[in-house]
Image (cartoon, grey):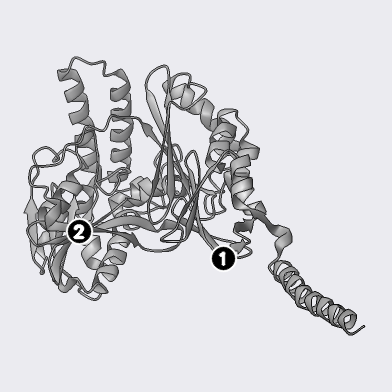
Amino acid sequence: MMNHWKKLLLSLTIVCLILPVTSISAAVEKTAGHENLVPIREIAEKNGAEVSWQQKTGEITIRKNEITIVVKVGEKQAIVNGQVRPLNNPVQLTKGITFMDGEFLTETLKAAPEDIFISLISEGEGKEAAKYVHTSVSGVLSPTLLSQLWGALEGQNGKITSEAIAKHVENNTVHRNVTYTFKTELTRLNITVRMNHNGLVDDLHIAAATPDVYQKPSYDDPSTYTEQDITVGQGDLALPGTLTLPKGEGPFPVVVLVHGSGPSNQDAAIGGAKPFRDLAVGLASQGVAVLRYDKVTYEHTYKVASQPKFTLKQESVDQVNDAVELLKKNAHIDSTAIFVAGHSQGGFAMPLIIAEDKQHDIAGSILLAAPSSSFADVLTEQQDELVDRMKQLGLDTDVIQGQADFYKNAAAIVKDPKYSKDHLPQAHNLSAQTTNKQVEVETLQDWLKHKISPCLLYRVKMMCKCL
């Protein structure tokens, strides 16, 4: 009888020990929001992705084509193609299986939003494509424009192939840039979709595809410098850039490089040349830091185009102010030795740049092939030069001559004293940006007459005709 009670007591004890464990396990899964969590490997592989785990770092990496997702157990975020994305629940490990937000995982592994966007505009489905556009640029990348964009491109370049022949992804501090290369009847075309950190289209950049034949200069010695990704400015027009620092303790003098006209990246790349990059690595090897950045008309092309009163100050001056403020806070930089070098239009804008330097933080300025006459005069000279060069090469000048006549007529209106940016002839095709460039800044010749701080003038033979 006693043995029977002992056996019953032992059985009850075992049941009491087992039940709490089961209850605790169920409670943990429930409070963790398990109804929204899915096993990572199972769902990822069903969506055609590969999963790997790094034991040393504890990172789980999920890859599918150009999409890379990195997560860690316990963290409430995921890194998608280098960008931090929040999760509704932390990643969890249960019985040797990792779980994460199911909706986030499946949506991210679907066709990339930029792929869907490109497909929609190629089909003229502007209304649907506009759903992928961020509000910062939705005013210009409207359903109507997106519906007509593909047809407009084909009108200029010939019929576009149905699928991209290449796709390249590059991240900077502002955008995830996805460039699609299309073959047309006449040329090859690059369409870059700039995605923001929320995975929405923030801008576009469209240009002819040219081969990258750049060769580093012989003096480029990576052991003499380091490069840091930086962001110049903030908000909708923030710009990605690079600070090239000499090796050593510092603090170092620094030069801020300011672009010429037109949309240019931070290297001022054109054809096989990258003059701003060459300057950066060359100066850094001699103990001088260099800050360069993508031009606002390059990184935010359509945003800028949608502002008819966008000024030279907004295009070439405001970013310098932001760059100087950034450099003043950098311990590696000598804040008493901040210089600004403006090439072509960047030099043309130097009077405005110095005038905006209210705290006198700029120690001196450098003019690289800067035009000394008015904007209208330079515009006329450039057009005449372009037509002459085309004739010398034996090329058809009909189209170029028409363009030259248009710009020369615009220059004549801008110079006419009876007109101003607020009073123009009724029948004109001038943009406010053109008239603003003429009236905003005095000529360098006049400015240099009363210039007080140091200024170096340097004429670059190969660039002297390029504003």
Question: Left of 343 or right of it: where is 91?
Answer: right
Residue tagged 1: 76
User: Three-letter amino acid code at disc 1?
Assistant: Lys
Image position, residue 24 (x, y; %):
73, 74
**Residue at 30% across / 50% down in the picture?**
437
Q: Quadrant of residue 173?
A: bottom left
**Residue at 13% across / 41% down in the picture?**
464
Q: Which residue is at the far bottom?
A: 2
Q: Which mark is residue 25?
A: none
Image position, residue 433 (x, y; %):
37, 48
Q: Residues within 10 Å of mark 2 (few under 14, many from 20)?
A: some
Question: Left of 60 or right of it: where is 432?
Answer: left
Residue at disc 1, secondary structure: loop
Q: Is 450 in front, or is 88?
A: 88
Q: Is 389 in front, or is 330?
A: 330
Quadrant holding the N terminus: bottom right
Q: Quadrant of residue 74?
A: bottom right
Q: Pick whichever of labels 2 and 1 is earlier in the sequence.
A: 1
Which mark is in front, 2 or 1? 1
User: Three-letter amino acid code at disc 2?
Assistant: Thr
**Residue at 19% across / 48% down in the picture?**
277
Is residue 397 something that shows in the picture? yes
Q: Residues within 10 Å of mark 1 (few under 14, many from 20)?
A: some
